[in-house]
Amino acid sequence: MTPAANDRETAIVIGAGAAGLATAALLGREGYRVTVLDRLAAIGGRSGEETVDGFRFDTGPSWYLMPDAFDHFFALFGKRTADVLDLVDLTPAYRLFAEGHPPLDVTSGRAEAEALFESIEPGAGRALGSYLDSAAETYDMAVERFLYTTFSGVGAVADAELLPRYGELAKLLTVPLDSFVARRCRDTRLRQMLTYPAVFLSSHPSRTPSMYHLMSHTDLVQGVQYPQGGFTAVMEALHGLAVEQGAEIRLGADVAAITFQGRRATGVRLVGGEEIRADVVVSCADLHHTETRLLPKAKRTYPERYFAPRDPGLGTVLVMLGVEGALPQLAHHNLLFSSEWGPDFEAVFNAPEPARPLGASRSIYVSKPSATDPSTAPEGCENLFVLVPVPPAESLGHGDMYRAQASPAVERIADAAVAQIAEWCGIADLAEHVVVRRTLGPADFAERYNAWSGGSIGPAHTLRQSAFFRGRNRSKKLDNLLYAGATTLPGVGVPMCLISAENVVKRLRGDRSPGPLEER
């Protein structure tokens, strides 16, 4: 058993992904002696990186949104984002390939977005202006009231300033995003542009509360950036902060159980039997895994019956392609939207459509980071990252990034995606120029990250799984066991992981106020 080296309070953080590294940095800032444990051999968790024959692939997040969340987090350590990341503004923000239409470049900036909408549908520009006004107000309300809070008190929602907005808030929580958008415009492409952020929330547009129209503020107003080096650079920045604050990072350390005595967690036991004691334990592992695998039934806040009716969110097949030659047809970010938008989501979130026996969506995302970052591909080549939404089903199998071969289902989905990009984006000979191809499937997410049901992002942001309905960030059975990461509040995505780390500190301080911590 590992003893404490000094009289400082100790903390164990399970997981060295975005939430784990951010939590370690903040706990170190609070004076804790922190040990971070991760079963993998590298930091980053789902935000990983693999290099194959000179092509450097990010295997996780690729959209840098909510820059204010990153700015605030780094400011807590007296740093500017520019001190730790080299950000590039993307123009266009993304290119839209809508089935049956020529491609559209979507440029960030309110005036540019309104002009684009107006050019496609007369009157839609003005409607978008009103929509973005509401998105900005809702975004500010979320930051001030609902994201940086543990919901351990009533202060976040029971406030005189918020009282006049209760009626509006009720509508934003109960009216689904697709219905909210449909009132503003008729053109399918415009509706898709305003509802696709539901995918970033691991959710179906008809089940996503319209409160999340705030996401359009992030890409159409705040803008889209890219950190040179990809999200690996973001993870390295967080790792650097954690180490600066004294955290010890132990990789290849697989936690088998959280140990306890009475109502106190005492530490963890690793696979192999080593026990490490701590005054505080923070699990940034998947919540389902934490509760159902690392704790006995008597100490679970969220037993299996809690998860049964809940939505594990989106599954994905990731296809990483190294392509010989230039691909000017593609921008950095590219969205391919099927005209069968509804059936696409049904195929992923409900029973597969008869025409899609694999349950794969034809509305897919393609990133070409080599458009901005030459380090991602050898000279004269392009790097493509393709995300195909699929059901969160381990039965779809593995890819071949970490195995000798992919499952037949993942292979067929990857083949279909490459063919679709070739056809829709005007790259007829794409398959012939692919020199590297690697895939990941839902079973990889389950195996590598202990992801519930093989989901790739985290539980869907439905009404029952948003804000104060999403859960709590501290165990009800062990007073010093806390949670952070995409599977707890406030939600999915790297910015939310940073905020969840901050909420751990607020919980330990007994801080029930809404809003971010004070910056240095």
Image (cartoon, rainbow, N blue to C red):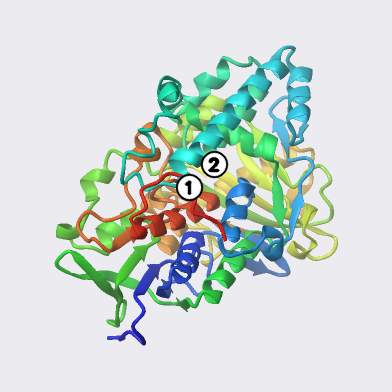
| Disc 1: which residue | 492
Towards the viewer: 382 or 139: 139
Whole-percent x, y for residue 163 in the image: 40, 25
* Residue 395 higher or lower than 254, as above or below: above
SS under mark 1? loop
- Location of the N terminus by quadrant is bottom left
Write the residue at 79% across / 42% down.
91
- Location of the C terminus by quadrant is bottom right
Whole-percent x, y for residue 226 in the image: 71, 53
Q: Which of the labelled discs sits on residue 200, or is there none?
A: 2
Q: Amino acid at mark 1?
A: Val
Write the residue at 67% across / 59% down.
81
Mark 2 and mark 1: Cα distance apart in space? 8 Å
Write the residue at 51% across / 47% down.
316
For mark 1, does the 10 Å Cα neighbourhood hold few (<14), some (14 to 19), or many (20 or more) residues? many
Whole-percent x, y for residue 350 in the image: 41, 32
SS under mark 2? helix
For mark 2, does the 10 Å Cα neighbourhood hold few (<14), some (14 to 19), or many (20 or more) residues? some
Residue 236 found in image quarter: bottom right
Towards the viewer: 12 or 337: 12
Residue that lies at the very extreme toward the top in this rendered image = 122
Q: Are marks 2 and 1 in contact (CB under 8 Å)?
A: yes
